[in-house]
Structures are given as C-alpha cells and as structure tokens.
Image (spheres, helix red, strand yellow):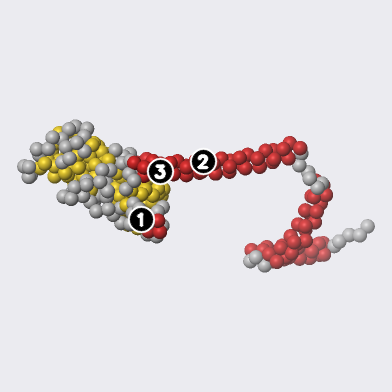
Amino acid sequence: MTTISFRKTLSLAAVFVIVSSVLIIMDRRDLLDPVREGLSSVVSPVARGFNAVAKGPDFRTDLEKELERVQKELDATRAENANLKAMIEEYKLIDEENRVESERPDLDFVAAHVTGGDPTGHQHFIMIDKGSADGVEVGMAVTDPDYYVGQVVEVTEHTAKVMFIVDTSAQVGAQLIDSRADGIVVGQWQVGGRLQIQHVDRDAEVKDGEWVVTSGSVATETRGVPPDILIGTIFGEPIPTERTNEVSYEVRPAVDFESLHTVWVVMPNDD
C-alpha cells in the first residue's frame, strides 16, 4: 500500500492554495474570460446536439402544435380587424367631409388628427397632423366640423398648432344669428369662464339660447374665418360695460374641447 508522507501532503495543499488564489485573482480581473468563452464555444454546440437528439426533430405535442396554429390565426384576425377599423374610420371621415362640403360648397374641409396639447396646461391648444404641405396656413378656422373650434396659430410642413377659442388669447368676430347684432367672442378659460361675446349693442334684442356664429359683417369679420360657423349659445343676463351703449353676454360653447380627436381645417373653395 502506497502512502504519502506528511511533508508531501503539506506541499500539495500549499500548491492547491496558491493555484486557487491565482485563479481567484485572475477571475476578479476578468483574465479568465477568454478561457471561459473558449470552453463555452466548444461545450454549447455539443450540448445542443445532445438536446436535439434527445428531443427528436419535432418534440412538441399535438396540443402544443394546435395551440401555436390557433395563436397564429388569432394574431392574423386581430391584424385584419385593426385594418378594418382603420378603414371604417377613414370612410367615416370621408362621409363627414362630403356632408359638410355639401352644406358649405363655398368651403373645403381638411380632416386632421389631434396629436397633443399644451403639456404645461397654461394655454388651451392642440397640435394636429396637417401642415403647410396640406395647404394649412396661419389664421385658418378649425371646426369639429359643425362648430367653431379655433384658429391655426403656427404651421410647420406636416403639423400645426390650433388655439382654442376658449383660450384668453383667442378672439373671433361674431354675430347673433337672430338679431344679427355684431360682437367679438373672446376666450375666458384662464379666468374661470368659457366664452363671452363683447361689444354688443345694448339695444339689440338678444334672446337667451340664441346662437352666436362667426361674423360675415365687414365691421367684425375675422380674416381667415368664414361667416356663419356656429360658436355657441347665449345664456344669462347682459353684463354692462363701462361704455353704456354696449353690453356683454356669456356664451356656452357648442364644442366639447376635451373630447376632440379629429378636427377640420376650413379652407376657401377656389373652384
């Protein structure tokens, strides 16, 4: 029986400790990465080969194959439904465009999708996905499409900024649809209101609920805004102003500005 002396055992232990320490230091300094990557490149293909042999050419069960087939069909159906919904929305826009243009043959309406608003919340505006490449210009009126929304205030090639009429920086020449009294509709959003029509003749026979429209009068019309677009309705009592021959009225806007997803830029029809 062969035995190892205590001195040899001690020497081997010392060598083991030294080698282990060297390997630990090399590993901490990432000096073993080439060796590790080399071994991985040799071992991984072999392991994959054994795994493939063990599982066979197609190791999936019939149930798994059926589930995969059903999932593919479901994905295809979802994609088809998404395309159909997009087509339906496009047809709706075309129908709406045809309707409003038949009612106002003097105007063209270009549909635009709302892409964002004021992130600071200080102003009441939206960004749309139509710009100068689509014929959009600063000052053009924007509708929903039946009611007045505001005006284009900035334009790039493919986008535009639309300031809502309710913003305090916005105003538009207006008339009362029955009495035909002139006035200026101004935004009141930042001061806790919505709309107000100002500079109305005190003697005008204004009725509660009377419609206010964009002006066609030379005295109050706004450049770029066609006449007779519905803005909102009068409510409440007249508000006296410092000038005794003029009053103001609160106006209830016809548009729900928070729910707009599509708007319409109004353009003159040159045909």
Q: Is residue 52 above or below residue 26?
A: above
Residue 127, labelled with which disc? none
* Mark 2 vs mark 3, CA separation in Å: 20 Å
On the image, which quarter does residue 93 sit in?
Answer: top left
Q: Is label 2 in a helix, a strand or a loop?
A: helix
Q: Is residue 225 above or below residue 69?
A: below
Residue furthest out toward the right: 1
User: Label 1: which residue?
Assistant: 136
Residue furthest out toward the front: 271
Q: Tell me what residue is drawn at x 79 percent, y 50 percent.
A: 51
Q: Is label 3 in a helix, a strand or a loop?
A: helix
* Residue 15 position within the rendered picture, expressed as x and y whole percent measured from the top left: 76, 65
The amino acid beneath tag 1 is: Val
Mark 2 vs mark 1: which is more N-terminal?
A: 2
Left or right of residue 202: residue 257: right
* Foreground of the two, 74 or 93: 93
